Structures are given as C-alpha cells and as structure tokens.
Amino acid sequence: MGDMGEIKALPGNIESSPYQRRSYMQAAQSLIRSLSISGSPATFLDNVVTLIQQETGVECIGIRVLDEHGYIPYQSYVGFSREFWETENMILISCEDCSCTRIITGNLLACDKLSVNSSGSLCVNDTADFVQQLSVAEFGLYRGTCVKTGFRSIAIIPIVYSGSVVGIIHLADFQPNMLSLATMEFVEFIAPLVGEVLARAHVENSVKTIQDTKALLENIVAGISSLAYIVDLRTYELIYVNKSLARPNCLDPANTQKCYELFGFTSVCPNCPVAKNLTGSNNSESRERYDSTGDRYYLAERKTLNLPQSTLSAAFVSDITQQKNAAKALRDTNIELEKSVVELQQLSATLEEEITERQAVQEALEKYRLFFLHSRDIMLFVNRNSGRILEANPAASKAYGYTREELLDSYIFDLRQEQDILLVKSQMKIATESGITFEAIHRRKNGSLFPVEVSSSVKSVGNEKVVFSVIRDISELRKMQAEIHEQVKLAGAVQKSLLPPYYQDDQLTIHPIFRPLTVVSGDFFGYRLTHDKTKLHGYLIDVSGHGIATALYTSAISSLLNEAIDREDPWSRETFNWLNQYIFDHMSDNVLVALITFTIDFTVRQITCWSGGINYLLASTQCSNGIVAIPGIYLGATRTPKFDSLTLPLQNGDTFYFMSDGISERLPREIVNHAAHFDETLDQLRRFTNGTVSDDCSALCIELRGLKQFPLYFDYSDLSQRLIIRHRINQLLINLTGEKAAKISIPFGEAIVNATQHGSSVHIKINKIGAKLILRVQDNGAGFRGNARVAELASADIGGRFEALLTSERGRGIPLMVLWSDKVLYNKQGNEVMLVKYLTCS
C-alpha cells in the first residue's frame, strides 16, 4: 500500500472540541502508520475495529465491505459471537431487507430516517423503544437478528468513497445508550479513511492483475514461430508483435502502431478475421484469409481475453498455403469416389433412420401399453363427437363392473347420472377445445354411485382426434376429508366447551362473545373469581393465523394463563416476560401472540389492565368513555419487550369490553358511542360478529353494579400506586364533604405520611358508619406510645399553635390529627392509628 499522507483537518460535519479533534487526528495517524508498516489492508481493518472498540467502549464492532456480487461480508470484526457471524455474514443487498442494506443502497424507509443523522449514519440507542414505535407491518421490514440477539444499542455508519457507499461500519452493544455523539463523530471520521484504503487496495490488485496477464501473454506469443501479434480491439493498436511477423510482404513491426498497417492498409483490413463479432458472446474464433497479393492462405486464430480494465485479442496467424493446395488435390482425387458412395450412404442412412424410429415407436407404445394396462386410474378413449367409448383399460372394468366388451359398446353418458347429460356435452366441448379437469359422480353397472376426478384432453390416434380421459376414484379421499372435517368440528366444540360461560351475581355481569372465522379459533379468554369474591382476574388472547396449528398454539398459551390465574396476583411484568420467553423457546418464529389481562379489585374498587399487543379496550367509566389505549408489544416479537399497565377507579354502572382485533379493528362508531348502555352495546356487538367477518372475533363484556361504597381498602406499600390512591382518597372526601374536604384531608394525610416513615408495608382502610368517617392506617414498624402523646396534646392548647404546626418540619403529625379530628386512637403496639371525623360537624 502507498503512503496515505498526513490528516490535515477533520471533515466539515464533525462538531467536536479541539481536544477531541486532536484525538481523532492522532487515531487516524496511528492507523496510517500501521498501514505503512504492514502494507496489508486486512491488518489495517483489524486495527480499525480494535481502535474503535478501545476508543468508544462499544462491545461489538464489524466492517462490512460490498463485493462485486452484491454481498456485504464482514472483512473484520470483534465482539460478535460465531453464531451471529454465521447468520449475518453473507447478506445480499438485492434480496435482504434491513437497515444495513438500505444504508448501502440509499433506499431508506420512513421508519429508518427517524434514526439517521445528517451524515447518513443510523443510530439507535434503545432497540426496545425503537421496536415499540414500529407497527407490525414496519417490524416485518427488518431482519431483526440484532434485536433477537439482544443488542440494545446499534449504529450503522456508511463507508463512502467517490460518492458511493462501498461498505459500512457496524456497532452493537447489549447495553442501551452506548452510542454518544462523540462516539458517532469518531467513527464517522474514521469511515472515509477506511473507504480510501479499500479503494486503493482494489486499484493495486487490478494493476497487478493486468501486469501479470500482459507478462503471461508475452511469454506465450514469444515462443510461437508463426506470425502473431496482440491488438486492442477497441482501437486496433498493437500491444505486442512477434519478431517472426517481419516478412517481405509486411511492414516493419517496430515502426507500426495499428495492426492493419502491418499489411499496408490505412484502415481496417477487408474481411478482417479479428474485427468480426466484436460484441458477440464468443471469446475465441478462427478464420481463414486469402492474400491475393502474394497468393497465399493464412489461418488467423483469435482469442478474446476479458481483463479487469480492457478487452484484448491475441491473434495467431499461420501460413497454410501448402496445406490448402494439398487438400484441394486430395478433394479432386476423391470427388468421383464420393459421388459413387453418396447414394449408398443416403440409402443406408434412410434405412437406419427408419429402423431407429420404428424401434423408438415400439418402445414408446410398449411403455404406454403397460401404463394403460396396469394403471390404477381409469383410462378411457372417447369419440369426441358421439361420446362412444373406443377403448378402456382393466381399471375401468374393475371400477364400473362392466367387461371391456361391454364398455366398448357403451357411451360416456351411460357412466353418468341422467341429470348430468347436458353437463357432459359441455364438458366434452371444453375438453376438445382446451382440456378440462373436474369432479363428477359416476355410476357403476349395478347402479351404485361414486365420486371421481376427471382430467380430459384431445389426443391424436392415427388420423383421428379422440378425447382421452384419466378418471380417479376419490371415494377414499372424500371419506378422509369428511373424517378430518368431523375431527375439526369436534376440536372446535371442545375449544368452545373450555370457554367460561355467562356469569351474573349481585356485583357484576359477564357476557362472553366467541365467533371463530372457521371451525376453530386463534382467540381464547378466561376469568376467575377469587373464593371470597373480592377480585376478578381475566385474560383475552389472539394468536396470529388461523386453523388447527393456530388453535393448538392458543390452547398452549391459555393453559399457561389458566395456571397463572389461580395465583393471588397473577398479572405482572414478570408474568408477561415468562410467557414471552416460552413463546420464543417452544413456538415457531412467525407466531405472534396478542394478550390483554385484567384484575377487578372490589375492595379498593379499581381495575388494573396489562397489555401485550391488545392495545385497546372499550370502556365507560367516571374517567373515560370510549376507546382506552394501553401500550404494549406483541409477545414473541422481541426478547426484550416492554409491557405497560393501566389502573382506573370503579363505580356502579361502569362497563368494560375486552376485544380481539377481529372486532376492535373494524368496530363501528355507533357501538363506541353507546358503551355506557351495556345491553344495547352487547346486542350491537353480537349483530356485528354474526355478520360477515374476516378474522376470529372474541370479547369479554363486563358490567359492574351493586358495588359496596364502604369499607375501602388500599395497599399503600407500592410506590407506583401511591399517587393514584391519594387522588382517590381526595376525590372521596370531596364527594362526602364538599368544601370541607381540604381541611379533613390534612389529618388523614399526616396519618398516612407517619406510617410511610415508620414502616415499609402500609395498609389503609376507610369506612363510613352513619355520620362517622373512619380512617385506619397500619404499618409494619415497631410502633410507639401514640395514645400517651394524644392524651398529652388533648390537655394542651394546640389551637394557638396552628400556624407553627403547619410550617414545622417535624413533630406536627399527631398534633394536626388531634386538632382536626374528632377522635384519635392508637392500637396497643402503636403501629396502627384510627381517626374519626363526624361529617355533620364543622
């Protein structure tokens, strides 16, 4: 490799600090020095990936180089596993659809451009977020191997030379956010240097190939005693001339530039043997040429050689005048002999041809005869005009119960039902014109009927065209199809019997809807009420595809969900990750599972939903009325998915409709608008699913009623739920006390805050007995002598200290509870407090 020189400045699109620019320059100069020392492009590429890994901290680095066949193999890499390399190494840019191929071809999609910077580099710092933003259709436009391998950070930097992308630098890491701006700038700075080295290596290889080829040609031609020269066919310029070409009738080769000047011409020689078919596909050719000036014959043998940068032709010219004269004398001597034997040869050839043809015909006829006699299918030759049976094989006699003679005395109409006579004539006409295949019912001699498949077309027999029919008895096939259909119907019945039925009690009504597109469904649902009827757990799944295989996948997933639903708290992010891993381990790659789960907690009057691909439900509650969205990716789409949940408060009259996409994607607006009217919405959904559908349709429709307002229980231990619980308590106080809610919420809030400061597990109970509002807060702390503190404050004047209490950092909790509550009482251990407020008092 030649000297790459010094790097004078950074590219214009690099926006870095002076320190970083000096660092980039030093890195580039070190690569150039290593190239100068080794002279090996392969070693240079190894040094590049090692340098990038050291400078950026990214675990996996690879350089792909576009070859002449359109593949982009890794010329050097570090960090990638052998399994990943074997899967991804030989990618053809014209066939494979992914970001790396589209960066090279320039055919970026809209979903790619969101992650491509102004330098043309793609950078994704969290593939989980990136996949979350894609639709199902967009997700299918990526090979997805990087995501399935578990890479969270991915970058693709183009290697550009002379305006063309000649390769890419691939960065990948299992950790997110590994691709800083400095990292991208550094690799984008290195990329042009890699492009320059690749281009120079290609040029030097091409030059060496041309030099080696020229030397080889000169060695070959120099050893030939006959006339020989090498000419560039595009310009007719001589590249090499053998010394033996210097003959009396030729010019001096040393002073000649064009090949035709050797023979005294100023332009291309007439009938030039090397000028023929210059654009043809043949790369070798030989022609004879007569030179009238010297009355000589020459044989010119040309071979076209396709070199990397040009096309060369080597012409070997020999004087064959003596051979030509001898050949002519021989021809004159043998001409009479040839005339004498020609008739005998023709006669012998004709006889041999006739014998060969007759043998071939006999062999073919024997094959057809054996096939006709021993075929298990019925074969009939039928007159195309009258329908008369001209010939029948033994299988026909066996199938119909007629002898061969009886069949040859019958018509094709005799084998069909009377009502099919007109249809037979139409089928015969189509068979005569273009051939036909159809199913029909044929009749045996004893009158019994059986189904057949008929394939008929016109064949030539001698000078006559007849209809040849191959007929197959499909009785067993029909029987097998009927058995399969019955088995599928049974599977559908079993699947439907496993679904939970309609349910109603004094708290809720559950109406299931189940409408498979075919006999079996890829949808399924289930629900369980806990033994104390304080919670309702449920789920609805929709597996991609249709048919038996999809139904089996659905059955497997529903079994796992039914196993989970019996747990105390079945639905969580851990449950969804467990199901996702199961799908990757035990199901085919193209299986996607959409899932939504829910838990209705009657004690705290709230519903929590988790989404794994079913992202919408229809609901009518105090918080929302219409379509409710919950983010969450399909199970089986990626090994690092993101699932989310939604929690809503409940009240009497709330309705919820959990639906598969066979309903939700085509849900009419009038159904959405009437979600609050449960019976009306239920009737509309049933009419909708009983109509024409294009997918499995399933729904769980739930109406809540008869909910007890009190007591209410809240688990305040979960930090993520505390804001929601405080909001619900405040809303409850507003509903009960109106303007007094702000004042009452102060002692309640202090009791809750005290509990969180003394214990990690906090539980709240709110009850209303007559005019008394009772709040109980319990923690798992050691407790303290709370009642003694209450008694001490009760005898003191704390009203005058009101302003000081509000602004105090510590010690204000119990005084505020005593001041604004009608009664404060601690349990014996001192880790549970009860506050009583009379709602009729000011």
Image (cartoon, helix red, strand yellow):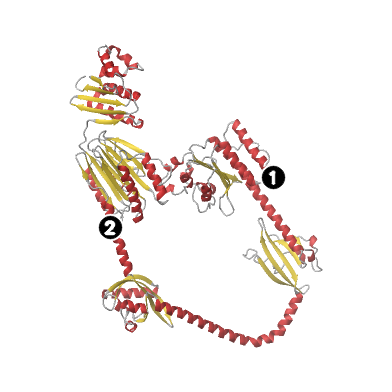
Front-most of residues 131 and 199: 131
Front-most of residues 817 and 330: 817
From the viewer's perspective, is residue 382 above or below residue 34?
Answer: below
Amino acid on which the number 1 mark rests in the picture: Gly
Instruction: Please tell me how crowded label 1 is: few (under 14), some (14-19), or many (20+) other residues with Cα within 10 Å.
Output: few
Residue 90 visible in this rendered orientation of the protein: yes
Number of numbered discs on residues: 2
From the viewer's perspective, is residue 381 above or below residue 228?
Answer: below
Image x and y of residue 562, in percent:
31, 45
Of the two numbered discs 2 and 1 on the same chain, state the one appearing first in sequence. Answer: 1
The numbered dot on residue 490 is 2
- Asked whether, in this view, residue 502 is left or right of residue 236, the answer is left
Amino acid on which the number 2 mark rests in the picture: Leu
- Asked whether, in this view, residue 578 is left or right of residue 8, the answer is left
Front-most of residues 509 and 257: 509
Image x and y of residue 527, in percent:
27, 44
Where, quadrant-wise, is the C terminus in this rendering?
top left
Query: Dot 2 lies on which element?
Result: helix
What residue does disc 1 label? 2
Confirm or deny contact between disc 2 and disc 1 (CB under 8 A).
no
- The residue furthest left is 770
Task: State which quadrant residue 566 falls in.
Answer: top left
Instruction: Please tell me how crowded label 2 is: few (under 14), some (14-19), or many (20+) other residues with Cα within 10 Å.
Output: some
Query: Dot 1 lies on which element?
Result: loop
